[in-house]
Image: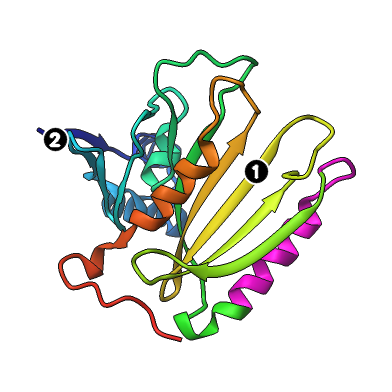
Amino acid sequence: MKRKYVLLGVVLILLVAVLCSCGVVGEIAQEAKNIMEAQDGRQMTIDDDGTVEVFYGTYQIPQGWEYSEKYTIDTDALAGKLFFIKSDVEPAGKYPTNISIEYGTNSYGVEDHERFRDSILAQLQTQMTEGDGILTGAGSYTAQGYRVYRFGIGEDESEDGISTVQYYIVGDRQYVMVHMTDFHDPSVLDADEAAQQIVDSFIWIEDEGNLEGQED
């Protein structure tokens, strides 16, 4: 049995309505309308076995984890960003240890993966502040044969007790980021392992049923 979540462009619908009521019917209103029409009807389904299907691909929710509607806001869902948390665990602090899966596009083809890697690394370095801990990085392949880059922040020890790991699965002018944020809740000990399982299970939608993987 599939659970289906229809992701409607509520925010964009309101934006178009406001622009029209104000008499703004030019390029801005038309662009918002175009985006709304492109996103309207996007949906996410979850099978009983934990398989998630979104508009850009499929992946598996690890056992003991679940989709969080509470932390997935509408605008994030429309962009393909979904949050998952440990099942039946109340957070020890303000926020739970979580894993988000996010889709994005860029100007880099699969063959330009090193330039993509360098741009992500530069961005992370500019975002880091004193006390965040050490930034680490490594490249490998997923179990499906896709190139993936892994960046960790604060895995050694951050001053605020938070560590994050970001996996970037490389596609052709697109990517998927699996982002694990660990608040080191003693009740959640498998967050990094769960994130890795999601990464290894991911399949691009265009490869469904005909996966050959990526080559060097």
Badge number at residue 164: 1
Q: Amino acid at mark 2?
A: Lys
Seen at 42% across and 64% down, the residue is 142
> Seen in the image, is 201 located left or right of residue 156?
left
Queried whether the magenta region covers residue 214, the answer comes back as: no
Q: Residue 139, position in %: x, y?
A: 58, 69
Q: Amino acid at mark 1?
A: Thr
Seen at 52% across and 78% down, the residue is 108
| Residue 165 or residue 17, whichever sits in front | 165
Q: Which residues are magenta?
A: 115-132
Q: Residue 95, position in %: x, y?
A: 60, 22
Marks 1 and 2: CB-CB under 8 Å?
Answer: no
Seen at 69% across and 39% down, the residue is 163
Q: Residue furthest right?
A: 130
| Residue 10 or residue 47, whichever sits in front | 47
Q: Which residue is mark 2?
A: 2
Discs 1/2, front: 1
